[in-house]
């Protein structure tokens, strides 16, 4: 007992009060916790209302109005997807969760994981579109809420990644035409605000299509999004390529590896591994940028929440609405961050 | 096997190879030495086109080295190279370092490539390290892996560019032992090194370079006892005294 107390005391001294500055920080944080924590917990949990009929009833209890989220949950999550068919986007969410968990837990070896993603995304497309197996067809304009956010993100990242590799390699190519094209593209895309780029692409993309062919706004936005991220990601990858010592190229050359083998087997794996933190940074930023897509009239998670807040009964519940949306975004972004840290640790353990 | 005819090379305005000519027969072992900046690395790197020469002709195994990419790759398959700083692939295990080129360049089945790799790892005496990553090995072990990696392509010719000069003294011997064995097995070798003990033991021909020129070529006994050129004598005097 005594030994335990002594140990606790020592731990406290070493970890919390080792220097005057540390002691001051510890006291400051303790002060903040004492001041803010009871109020926050009281608002979010103790005085929160799950059953109130409207925002005025919530205000009476003085706590968070989670009743709004519950009341509007299906609209916030699925938007205007036909009400009776909303089990379909619900399954889509489950599929995404399963895919993310499978990637995160590394239960599946790489090749199977790739297959799982391909199959999963196929199932997502099938469920969202319908038109087969007795599921009524649902137009992409009605794909709203969280599934839309996830489809935009997954598609955007999935398309942008290979494109970014090509751009990064292109920018370092010895062929002047390829190099110039890559530079012009990257600098062009990076030099324009995302929203301007989005409007521009929605207008420009149809011009590249043969007359009579139209693609839904969702896909145009998706492509615009992917093209935009690709430019950022390309610069991240290029940074990694520059970090590879010349000796690696020479060793691959000396073994007789051609350009493709050299790039795919020797250079890129190393360049991608050293840039994981920067890639994830880009991905997290891009994931959050999907929220900007509402500006062209697509109803993502944030836009659905805004719409729900127009309900006269819940006008005052906007804090709860945005806290909820923020929490959903946070869960995804933080998982990406955790995943990347694990990946880094694993690669670091193997190689250093 | 290898023939350089009046090869010239410039880096920018600086000439680093001046009319270099050299003929190496099959199974012959050539040791190249000379002061720093003499152009030794540049010369042997021209042989597998890591550097491009601007004048003169280079023939390897009867094929002339030109800008033709397919031909360059064909020659590189037959020419193994070992670098001063090993240049192992850090993201691959030792075994994967060794099997990479046989599998992707020679199109060898993985099992066969792995058997071959283990055979060469035994020859360089580190089969137990197959599953490790290069960073987990000592410098001497890394260099032996690098030699095995080059040998896995079953090259006709091996080029060594100062393979022991980045190593601690106690590791130099283990690498030289492997190289001596390789020399005794009849491999055609060009070796840039200042390990004169090794040169005496295995070289058929000594080449001395200075300031981009081949100053003297001679068999080792004459090279060490009666060098003809004054510059060779000065150089030998300096490095043999150490
Ligand atoms: N990529 C390059 N660009 C410009 N100059 C170079 C380059 N590589 C080598 N040189 C120059 O060419 C000359 C010959 O270099 P080289 O590396 O062949 O010499 P070396 O005999 O191998 O010397 P060391 O014993 O120091 O390795 C040197 O003066 C060097 O500065
Ligand atoms: Mg050199």
Image (cartoon, rainbow, N blue to C red):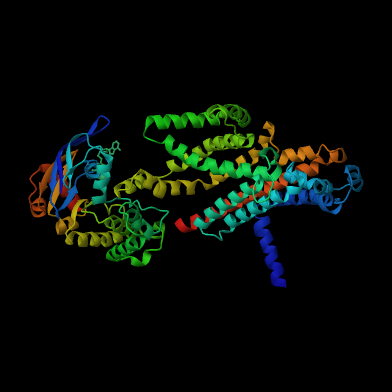
In the rendered image of this protein, does residue B77 appear above or below residue B171?
above
In the rendered image of this protein, does residue A298 appear above or below residue B97?
above
Side of A179 relative to A196 (left or right) = left
Given residues A155 and A344, the one toward you in this image is A155
Side of B117 relative to B61 (left or right) = right
Given residues B226 and B24, the one toward you in this image is B24
Determine which quarter of the picture holds residue B15: top left
In the rendered image of this protein, does residue A121 appear above or below residue A185?
below
Side of B122 relative to B206 (left or right) = right
Given residues B21 and B79, the one toward you in this image is B79
Asked whether the viewer can see residue A352, the reply is no
- Residue placed at 57% from the left, 55% from the top? A103
Q: How many marks?
A: 0
Side of A334 relative to A69 (left or right) = left
In the rendered image of this protein, does residue A215 appear above or below residue B229?
above
In the picture as drawn, the residue positioned furthest to the bottom comes out as A1
Question: How far across and down, in percent of the image, does residue A307 sit?
Answer: 78, 37
- Residue placed at 73% from the left, 48% from the top? A85
Asked whether the viewer can see residue B219, the reply is yes
Question: How far across and down, in percent of the image, does residue A294 sit?
Answer: 69, 35
Question: How far across and down, in percent of the image, does residue A138 sit?
Answer: 68, 42
Rendered-image quadrant of the C terminus of chain A: bottom left
Rendered-image quadrant of the N terminus of chain A: bottom right
Question: How far across and down, in percent of the image, does residue B119 sit?
Answer: 29, 65
Q: Quadrant of ligand 1?
A: top left
């Amino acid at each position: 007992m005594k030994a335990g107390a002594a140990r606790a005391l020592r731990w406290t001294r070493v970890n919390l009060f080792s220097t005057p500055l540390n002691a001051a920080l510890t006291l400051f944080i303790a002060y903040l916790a004492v001041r803010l924590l009871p109020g926050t917990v009281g608002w979010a949990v103790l005085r929160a209302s799950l059953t109130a009929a409207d925002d005025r009833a919530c205000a009476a209890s003085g706590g968070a109005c989670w009743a709004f989220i519950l009341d509007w949950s299906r609209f916030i999550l699925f938007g205007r997807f036909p009400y009776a068919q909303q089990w379909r986007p619900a399954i889509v969410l489950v599929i995404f969760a399963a895919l993310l968990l499978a990637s995160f837990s590394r239960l599946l070896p790489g090749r199977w994981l790739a297959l799982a993603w391909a199959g999963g995304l196929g199932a997502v497309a099938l469920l969202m579109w319908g038109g087969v197996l007795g599921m009524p067809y649902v137009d992409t304009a009605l794909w709203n809420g969280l599934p839309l956010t996830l489809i935009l993100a997954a598609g955007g990242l999935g398309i942008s990644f290979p494109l970014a590799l090509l751009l990064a390699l292109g920018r370092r190519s010895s062929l002047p035409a390829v190099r110039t094209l890559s530079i012009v593209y990257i600098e062009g895309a990076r030099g324009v605000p995302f929203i301007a780029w989005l409007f521009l692409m929605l207008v420009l993309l149809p011009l590249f299509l043969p007359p009579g062919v139209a693609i839904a706004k969702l896909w145009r936005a998706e492509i615009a999004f992917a093209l935009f991220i690709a430019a950022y990601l390309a610069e991240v990858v290029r940074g990694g390529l520059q970090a590879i010592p010349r000796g690696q190229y020479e060793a691959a050359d000396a073994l007789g590896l051609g350009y493709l083998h050299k790039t795919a087997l020797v250079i890129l794996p190393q360049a991608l591994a050293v840039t994981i933190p920067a890639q994830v940074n880009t991905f997290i930023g891009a994931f959050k940028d999907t929220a900007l897509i509402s500006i062209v009239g697509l109803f993502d998670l944030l836009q659905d929440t805004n719409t729900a807040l127009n309900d006269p009964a819940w006008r005052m519940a906007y804090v709860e609405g945005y806290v909820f949306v923020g929490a959903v975004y946070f869960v995804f972004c933080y998982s990406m961050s955790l995943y990347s840290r694990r990946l880094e640790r694993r690669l670091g353990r193997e190689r250093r | 096997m290898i023939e350089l005819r009046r090869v010239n090379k410039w880096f920018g305005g600086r000439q680093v190879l001046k009319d270099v000519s050299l003929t190496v027969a099959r199974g012959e072992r050539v040791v190249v030495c000379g002061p720093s900046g003499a152009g030794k690395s540049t010369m042997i790197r021209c042989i597998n086109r890591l550097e491009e020469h601007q004048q003169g002709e280079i023939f390897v195994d009867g094929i002339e080295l030109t800008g033709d990419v397919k031909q360059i790759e064909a020659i590189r398959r037959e020419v193994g190279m070992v670098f001063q700083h090993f240049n192992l692939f850090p993201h691959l295990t030792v075994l994967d370092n060794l099997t990479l080129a046989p599998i992707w360049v020679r199109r060898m089945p993985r099992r066969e490539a792995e058997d071959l790799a283990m055979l060469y790892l035994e020859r360089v005496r580190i089969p137990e390290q197959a599953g490790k990553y290069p960073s987990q090995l000592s410098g001497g072990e890394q260099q032996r892996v690098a030699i095995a990696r080059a040998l896995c392509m079953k090259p006709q010719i091996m080029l060594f560019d100062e393979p022991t000069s980045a190593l601690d003294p106690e590791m130099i011997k283990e690498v030289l032992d492997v190289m001596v064995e390789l020399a005794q097995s009849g491999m055609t070798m060009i070796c840039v090194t200042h390990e004169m003990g090794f040169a005496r033991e295995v070289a058929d021909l000594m080449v001395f370079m200075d300031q981009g020129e081949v100053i003297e070529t001679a068999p080792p006994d004459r090279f060490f006892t009666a060098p003809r050129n004054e510059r060779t004598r000065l150089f030998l005097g300096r490095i043999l005294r150490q």
